C-alpha cells in the first residue's frame, strides 16, 4: 500500500510526501527548509525519516528548499542531470545527488520511483510514477500539455496528482503581463482546467480511484472552477467511483492509494 499527502501546492511552494511501509520520499521541495520540516511534523512525519528527495525540475517553487533540507537532515537528492545543473546543485554542499534517467526505475526501500519526461520550460523536467506494495501513484505538476506518452505511463495508476493551473478567461483578463501569459499558454507552460477535463474524460486509466488536482493559480483560477470542470468531465464518462480532491496551497490530508481496482483497459487517446 502507498499513502501520500500534499504538503505544499502552487507558486508558493510544492512538495508531496509518499510512503509505503517504513520508506518515505519527498517529491519536490519548493518550501523553505524550516517550513518544509514543520509541515512534515504536522503530518506526523519525522523529517529525518525521509529517505530521498526527488526533484521534478529546477524552478524555485519545486526546488527552493532542497539543498538546505538535504544538508539539515542528511537526505540524498535525486533528479535528472539537467535539473542538477540548472538548479546549481553542484555548488551546494549536500549529502549527495543521484542522477535519475527517465524510464529507469529507482528503488528506495519499499518504493520504486520512475521519472517520465514532460513538456515544460525547464531544462529536463519530469513527472513521477511511484510504486509500492502493488499500488501505483502518478505525480505530474508543471507541464504544458498531456501527450500520449505521459497518458500511457499513467494508465496503471491507482491515484493521480495533476496540476490544473489556470482558467483561460481569468488568465486572459488577469494582471499578468502578456509575455507571462504567453509562457503559461504555451505547449511548455501549464495545464488549463479544460486540458485536465479532457484527460479525465478520455485518458484516465480504469485502475484509478483517486485524483488530486493542484498547482491552482491564485490569480488565474479558482478551486470551484477546477472542481466544476473536473467533476463534469468525470460525469460525462461515468467515472462515479473517482474520489476527487482539490489541493490548496497548504496541501491535503493523507490519501491512501487503493491497489485493488481492476486492471486498466486499452488506452483511449484524445
Image (tube, grey):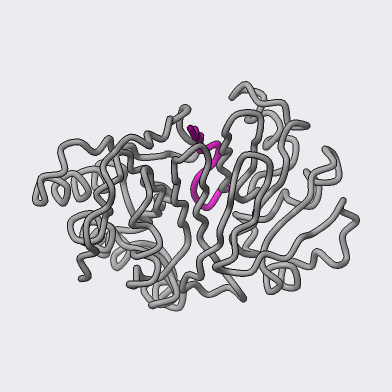
Q: In percent of the image, x 52 and y 56: which residue is there?
A: 128
Q: Nearer the viewer, residue 154 or 95?
A: 154
- Looking at the image, the residue that sits furthest to the right is 93
Instruction: Tally the numbered discs.
Output: 0
Whether residue 9 is in magenta: the answer is yes
Q: In percent of the image, x 24 and y 47: which residue is there?
A: 225
Residue 18: where, in percent of width, then height? 56, 38
Q: In the picture provided, is 82 more to the left or to the right than 97?
A: left
Q: In the picture provided, is 258 more to the left or to the right than 195?
A: right
Q: In the picture provided, is 113 more to the left or to the right than 231?
A: right
Q: Nearer the viewer, residue 37 or 96?
A: 96
Whether residue 101 is in magenta: the answer is no
Q: Which stretch did the figure color magenta?
A: 1-13
Residue 96: where, in percent of width, then height? 84, 55
Q: In percent of the image, x 18 and y 56: which residue is there?
A: 201
From what the image shows, is residue 214 above or below residue 63?
A: above
Q: In the picture provided, is 184 more to the left or to the right than 23?
A: left
Q: Quadrant of residue 166?
A: bottom left
Residue 181: where, in percent of width, then height? 40, 72
From what the image shows, is residue 188 above or below residue 79?
A: below
Q: In percent of the image, x 63 and y 30: which residue is there?
A: 39
From what the image shows, is residue 173 above or below residue 130?
A: below
Quarter of the image where the C terminus is located: bottom left
Residue 85: where, in percent of width, then height? 75, 73
Q: Quadrant of residue 195?
A: bottom left
Amino acid at each position: 500500500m502507498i499513502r501520500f499527502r500534499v504538503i505544499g501546492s502552487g507558486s508558493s511552494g510544492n512538495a508531496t510526501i509518499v510512503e509505503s511501509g517504513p520508506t518515505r520520499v519527498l517529491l519536490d521541495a519548493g518550501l523553505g527548509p524550516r517550513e518544509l520540516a514543520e509541515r512534515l511534523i504536522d503530518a506526523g512525519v519525522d523529517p529525518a525519516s525521509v529517505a530521498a528527495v526527488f526533484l521534478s525540475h529546477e524552478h524555485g517553487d519545486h526546488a527552493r528548499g532542497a539543498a538546505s533540507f538535504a544538508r539539515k537532515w542528511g537526505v540524498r537528492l535525486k533528479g535528472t542531470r539537467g535539473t542538477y545543473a540548472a538548479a546549481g546543485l553542484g555548488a551546494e554542499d549536500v549529502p549527495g545527488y543521484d542522477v535519475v534517467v527517465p524510464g529507469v526505475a529507482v528503488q528506495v526501500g519499499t518504493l520504486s520511483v520512475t521519472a517520465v519526461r514532460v513538456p515544460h520550460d525547464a531544462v529536463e523536467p519530469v513527472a513521477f510514477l511511484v510504486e509500492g506494495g502493488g499500488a501505483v501513484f502518478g505525480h505530474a505538476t508543471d507541464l504544458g500539455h498531456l501527450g500520449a506518452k505521459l497518458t500511457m505511463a499513467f494508465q496503471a495508476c491507482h491515484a493521480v496528482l495533476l496540476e490544473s493551473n489556470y482558467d483561460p478567461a481569468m488568465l486572459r483578463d488577469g494582471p499578468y503581463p502578456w509575455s507571462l501569459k504567453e509562457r503559461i499558454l504555451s505547449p511548455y507552460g501549464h495545464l488549463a482546467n479544460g486540458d485536465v477535463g479532457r484527460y479525465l474524460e478520455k485518458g484516465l486509466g480504469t485502475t484509478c480511484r483517486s485524483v488530486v488536482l493542484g498547482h491552482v493559480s491564485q490569480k488565474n483560477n479558482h478551486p470551484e472552477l477546477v472542481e466544476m470542470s473536473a467533476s463534469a468531465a468525470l460525469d460525462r464518462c461515468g467515472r462515479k467511483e473517482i474520489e476527487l480532491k482539490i489541493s490548496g496551497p497548504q496541501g491535503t490530508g493523507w490519501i491512501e492509494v487503493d491497489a485493488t481496482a481492476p486492471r486498466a483497459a486499452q488506452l483511449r487517446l484524445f
